Image: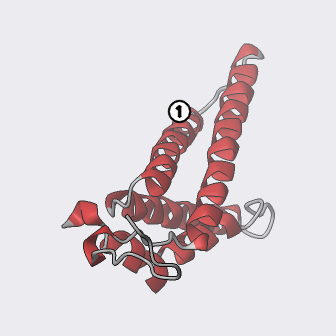
């Protein structure tokens, strides 16, 4: 069997491997940073609540709710991060965008609730970047044109 030099075999369009956008990996790295931060935040909130209770102070149930929701958000983001890299499914992208905008909205609620005296900590820059990156046309095309959606 003789091979011609310089010629490439023709690949059918449905078998052609597309390149994943570089932004996918950056977004996934930022999501994993958020997963770690949410776990640490949940541990901190629950630890401080237990410390207050052990000293006889009253702890509102909302504090425990925030701690457990932080763990839930971390778990959802971790599952979605794995699926965003592994398969080109659309629903993890929508799930992450929804979680990120909920985090941004909750930050604004905390900001306005704190008034001028407190402040709400660090602005939610990572959630905004992740949500805006996942909403870009390049990312939308990558996940919506998935062979898993056909």
Residue 145 location (% of width, % of height): 31, 74
Q: Residue at x 74, y 29 (%)?
A: 48
Above or below, comparing residue 137 to residue 75 in the picture: below
Where's the N terminus, which quadrant?
bottom left
Residue 93 location (% of width, % of height): 41, 63
Above or below, comparing residue 31 to residue 37 in the picture: below
Q: Secondary structure at mark 1?
A: helix
Q: In the image as oriented, which residue stretches furthest toward the right?
A: 117
Left or right? Give the position of 132 relative to 83: right
Residue 131 location (% of width, % of height): 53, 71
Crowdedness of circle 1 by 10 Å Cα count: few (<14), some, many (20+)?
few
Q: Is residue 136 visible?
A: no
Above or below, comparing residue 72 to residue 136 in the picture: above
Q: Nearer the viewer, residue 77 or 83?
A: 83
Q: Residue at x 68, y 31 (%)?
A: 43
Q: Residue at x 52, y 82 (%)?
A: 6
Left or right? Give the position of 83 relative to 121: left
Q: Nearer the viewer, residue 119 or 22?
A: 22
Q: Is residue 111 visible?
A: yes
On the image, which quarter does residue 18 sit in?
A: bottom left
Residue 132 location (% of width, % of height): 55, 77
Q: Residue at x 73, y 17 (%)?
A: 56
The residue identified by callout 1 is 61
């Amino acid at each position: 069997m003789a091979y011609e030099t310089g010629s490439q075999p023709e690949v059918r369009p449905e078998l052609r491997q597309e390149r994943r956008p570089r932004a996918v990996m950056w977004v996934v790295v930022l999501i994993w940073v958020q997963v770690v931060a949410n776990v640490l935040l949940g541990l901190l909130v629950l630890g401080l609540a237990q410390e207050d209770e052990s000293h006889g102070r009253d702890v509102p149930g909302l504090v425990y709710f925030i701690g457990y929701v932080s763990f839930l958000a971390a778990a959802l983001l971790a599952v979605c991060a794995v699926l965003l890299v592994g398969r080109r499914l659309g629903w993890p992208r929508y799930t992450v965008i929804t979680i990120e905008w909920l985090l941004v909205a909750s930050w604004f609620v905390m900001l306005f609730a704190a008034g001028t005296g407190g402040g709400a900590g660090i602005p939610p820059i990572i959630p905004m970047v992740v949500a805006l990156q996942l909403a870009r046309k390049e990312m939308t095309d990558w996940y919506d044109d998935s062979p898993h959606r056909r």
